[in-house]
Amino acid sequence: MTGQPAGGVAVKAFPVARSEARLLVPALMFIALVVAAVGSLGAPLVTSVATSFHVSLGSAQWTLTVALLSGAVATPILGRLGAGPHRRVTILATLAVVVAGSALTVLPLPFAWLLAGRAAQGIGLGLTALMMGVARDHLPEERSAAVIALISVVSIIGAGVGYPLAALLAELGGLRAAYGLGLVVTAAALLTAWRSVPEAPEGRSGHVDVAGAVVLAAALLLVLFLAGERNLWSRHLAVAAGIAVLAVVLLCVWAVIELRSTTPLVDVRAVRHPAVAGANLAMFVGGIGMYLLLTLITRYAQTPDGSGYGFGLTTFVAGLVLIPFSVLGFVAGKLTPRVRTRIADPLLLAGSAVVVGGGFALFAAARSNLAELFAAMGVLGFGVGGFSAAMPGVILAVTPKSETSSAMSFNYVVRSVGYSLGSAIGGLILAVGTGPGHLFPDDSAYTTAALVGIGAMAITTLTSLALARRRSSETNP
């Protein structure tokens, strides 16, 4: 498959894209779903890992954290490689690494090898933006917009698909069976990519800013480490503050490097565009709120009812609570491309943020039975689905086609950091709300966390409305 450089439509690509669209689109969706689901496999298996490998829960938690870390670090690098002429090779090589990592999680090896395998699996999280780049290059414009929106949604609901499946396999066949699911689906994704993903259009640069990549990786490692190590803030505040300052300094150094580079990892000048900057701010704050509610509901559902609240659900049954999240998130993703013909993307962001805020309000006011938790999770899924589907439209409206992977990769880094902070903030609020000698937080701590989430979604809504107002003023001077 061939095509023109970034300016126009790939003339030779269109006939091929039309004849293979029925294969290409499901392939892109499947790959995005697999890398998202495999990246989240650590969540329901933390307790099983601690028991099987005889490590602490804190150490076992790193099977999830290390995947998020490697994903955040790899995403901008893969985004830049994906913007160049070797995108197909990059996708195949990355999936090969993910398959190798999946094999490490299945083999009877020590705990350190499990962590290495999870880190390799996490690298696959950076492929979502590359799937968007393929769709934008090789599908007609109207079709590509809808597909990109769905890819964005699928990357979110993948966790809702992988969580209950992994938990069920862990209960039926043990830890290795659950991780075996990751090996099977990643191998299928590699085969799918090999058969379906086309070459990138010619005339693009594939240079990677190595210095910028190293500095950004170091900064992200520090930020996500701080988000994951909640006890550091309570026990070693000075150390935590010092690491935070160092992370900010590294991010500033990275920005300077990118501005001076002829082949930047991320086009910082483009990121500074008001539409892109506003979208990333909305993604950051909204990500904090979205992941905060997701973790609150799943943790509440698994709290033993002897604590005065909660339902004492098993890991698998608690995973079923995520089904409304996934189903309604997908429904919102399917509806959004139709709605955006009448409503601007920034307004869709604002409306979706209001829906997520409604999920927080529902959880804060009513959580005495499982039906209410299912309802709150469904509202969250619908809001997250709409938000995720609308976000690419805001960014790509002012982004050259050749920079699709890079621009969306940066947005996904922002999302990863927001999610990590959302998880950390939720854990911190619940920790503060846990009385001396108590194992579980007071019920009121969940209400406090929900109110914080409502505040985060209010900021997201206002940011999105500001974006909508700016776009309106630009189109109607």
Image: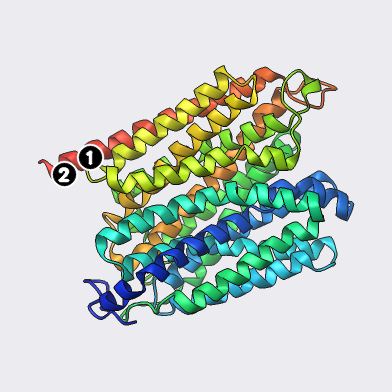
The x and y percentages for residue 56 are 84, 46
Circle 2 crowding by C-alpha within 10 Å: few under 14, some 14–19, many from 20 = few
Tell me the residue at 35%/31% (across/down): 462
Residue 437 shown left or right of residue 298 in the figure: right
> Relative to residue 329, is residue 42 depicted above or below?
below
Q: CA distance from mark 2 to mark 1?
A: 6 Å
Tell me the residue at 65%/57% (across/down): 67
Element at badge 1? helix
The image quarter containing residue 446 is top right
Element at badge 2? helix
Q: Is residue 374 visible?
A: yes
The image quarter containing residue 133 is bottom left
Residue that numbered label 2 is attached to = 474
Residue 137 shown left or right of residue 192 in the figure: left
Residue that numbered label 1 is attached to = 470
Residue 226 shown left or right of residue 266 in the figure: right
Camera-nearest residue between 202 and 301: 301
Could you tell me the amino acid type at mark 2?
Glu
**Among all residues in the image, which is located at the extreme left?**
477
The x and y percentages for residue 276 are 33, 50
Position of the C terminus, as image quadrant, is top left
The x and y percentages for residue 28 are 45, 65
Q: Is residue 75 visible?
A: no
Tags 2 and 1 in contact by the CB under 8 Å rule?
yes
Residue 113 shown left or right of residue 404 in the figure: right
Q: Tell me, what colour scheme is on the image?
A: rainbow
Could you tell me the amino acid type at mark 1?
Arg
> Relative to residue 414, is residue 292 depicted above or below?
above
> Relative to residue 173, is residue 362 depicted above or below?
above
